[in-house]
Structures are given as structure tokens and as C-alpha cells.
Amino acid sequence: MRIVYLTHWFDPEPGVIKGPRFVRALEAAGHEVTVVTGFPNYPGGRLYPGYRLRPIMRETIEGVSVVRLPLYPSHDGSSLHRALTFLSFFLSALIYCLVRRTRFALAYVYHPPITVGLAAAIAGLVRRLPFVLEVQDLWPDTIAATGMGGGRWIARLLDPACRFVYRRAAAILVQSEGMRRTLVARGVPPAKITVSHNWADLDPLPSLPSASGDPLTIVYGGNFGRAQALATVVDAAALVEQRRRDVRILLYGAGIDAAMLRERARRAGTSIIEFRDRIPRHAIAEVFARAGALLHHLAADPLFEITIPSKTQVYLATGRPIVAGIAGEAAALLRESGAALVVPPMDPAALAQAICDLAEMPVAERQAMGCAGRHFYQQNLSFEQGMARTLALIEGTYRA
């Protein structure tokens, strides 16, 4: 069937779970897919080199047909700027879906933000276009939890739009059981919801490294935002340094908290933590594979207890031991895997202790943790398993 894949973000932006590999798998199953997205600007809020805003741009990325529509590029702490970003792409996507002459049989919508789903819901009323909504972050809860200025007020405004989109969706795919329970409590029929955990967008999986007795290097890669609460990591590093100097903590990424984190580390006077710029996905995967261990952290918030960040699957697939300050469903998954030392979020002393415990562990024991994580990923969270569930949902929705 002919599918339009609506997503605010797409390659080459980082952290895109359902990127070219996902689209190629849909096409291998016999579907014709057009990706409709914005101009790349995440996480810095500036257009990537080689791009300039225009009414429409077409390109091919890794064999995938991509249509780019204009938006207001921004990713800072301003609620006004963030709203302009979301609303501008909402208008672009809505107009595209309404005026395109060739009809699609189905829209596959990646959420967040909910404004993309709202465009699909409104266009679907006019063009009789059913859509599948994939929920990666639960809105309006996420807006309230991120600490963005005016976030709780904006969340109250968004709640009716979210409920409208959930009601209009032909089917909803969520990435955790907690999200499913929450949506059911909000009146979404259980039969409409499918749970499918994310996979790691790594193809092929990196080779498992050999054991190393070198000083422990712990790596974080991702966004430096309010949700990650990486100030806890900086504070934990200062505590670790009081006990041992044979640990290095490398933070790769960018985001609205980057300047604050660097200043916090400078004031703490810690020398074991280093900040590195964001690097491409294939490069950070190589960094992960060479690391002694990987670091995971999220803010303490009820929303994040029902969220499984995509980093969780990436870390497990990489086959490295993990130290995590995280709660809820993601914490349970990591504990079950046998690959992680898990402590409560936003507790620098507990995180520092876990890092020291990992450093004191025999190298062979850390190696066994990483192997356990890789095995758990392959048995429970693989790309093939996730695609089978997604294809069954898409094709079942279309037939319905």
C-alpha cells in the first residue's frame, strides 16, 4: 500500500529510532513509503549545513524518498520558540496532506510532538485517511515534565488536542506497558493499543570488545536536556573523584543544558568528567562499543517511570555494562537484563557509589554483564521482532 510517514524529525538528526532502516523494511514488505519531515535542526536549533528553508525539498537518504517541509528551527528553553517550531511543521504537514493529488492509503505518524498527529487527524477527516499513531513520549505529560517555561500551562492547553488525536487514530503503538495503562485510563479503547518496545538502530550490531584492564571509561551519548538531569552526573563525578582517579566519564552530545553543565563541572573542579561535541550516529556507536561502560540517567518524574528511552535498547545491544540512575519500567528492564547497576535517579551519592562499584569489579565480571545485555536484547528487543509487530499492526489497520 502507499504510506506517508509523518515525522517531525528524521535523519540526519540524531536519536531517530524509526529512520531509513525502518522505512526500507516497510518497503521490503511490499509497501511504497514517502517520508514527510522538517528541515534538520535538532538538537542545536540551527539548520544543518547544506540545507536552507524552502517550500518543499525532496531528497533520497539511504535509498529512502524524503520530502522536507518548512518549519521554524529552534530547540531552546523558550516555550514560545518551541511552540513556533511545532506549529509551523503542523501547518506544513497539514497543507501537504490536504493538497497532494496522489492519495495515500495510510499515514504512519511518529509522536512527539502531538502536532504531527493533529495534522494527520484533521487531514484524515477531509481526505478519509486512516492513521497509525506511534507514541514515543506521552503528551501532554512530557511538556509538563521537561521544565520548559510555561510547560504546565501549555500542557493543559494541549490535553484536548491529545485526546482528539488519540480518539481519531485507527491504531496506536506505544513503547511501554505503562503508556498503555495510562492511555486506557484516559479512555482509549484497549483494543486500539499495541505495545512494542523499541529496538536499537544499529545495523550491524558492533562486535563485542575483548576484555581490557585499562582504567574505566564511562560514556554517555545523547541529549543534554532537562529530562536527562545530567547535573546529577556532574555532581556524582565530583564525589567519585574524591575516592579514585582511575575513572573517566565522557559526555557526548548537545542540548539546552550544555552550558550549565560545563559551568557546574568547572565550579566543582572535577577533572574526571569531559564534555565532547555531538558526533554522527555511526561514530557514537563505535564510541559506545569501545567504552568500558555506558551511563544512563533520567530525571525523577512519574512520567519517566512509564517511559523506556531508546538509549536503553542501544546500550543493551552494544554489549557493554551499564550504570544507570533511572526508575520505573526502564529500570526493571535493565535489572532483568543482568547488564546494569541501577540506582534511583537524581541521587549523586548513589550514582557515585555505583560507578565506584563498577570500577572495583573484576574486568571479566564487567565483560559478562555486557554479554548478558547483548543476549537479552537479541532475545527480547530485536529489530526483527519489532518490525513483525509493526507490520502486523499496519496491515491490520489498513484491512480494517
Image: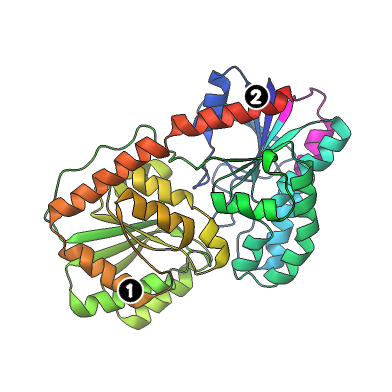
> Which residue extends farthest right?
126
Q: Residue 317 placed where, x, y %?
A: 35, 42
Q: x%, y% of residue 174?
A: 59, 45
Q: Are marks 1 and 2 in contact (CB under 8 Å)?
A: no
Residue 77 visible within the image: no
Which residue lies under the disc numbered 2? 395
Magenta residues span 92-106
For the N terminus, give its image quadrant: top right
Residue 370 on the magenta segment: no
Looking at the picture, which amino acid does disc 1 mark? Answer: Ala
Q: Name the residue under label 1.
A: 350
The residue lying toward the viewer, choosing from 1 and 34, is 1
94 in magenta: yes
Q: How far apart are marks 1 and 2 (CA)?
A: 47 Å
- Give the residue displayed 23% in from the left and 54% down from the top: 292
Q: Earlier in the sequence, mark 1 or mark 2?
A: 1
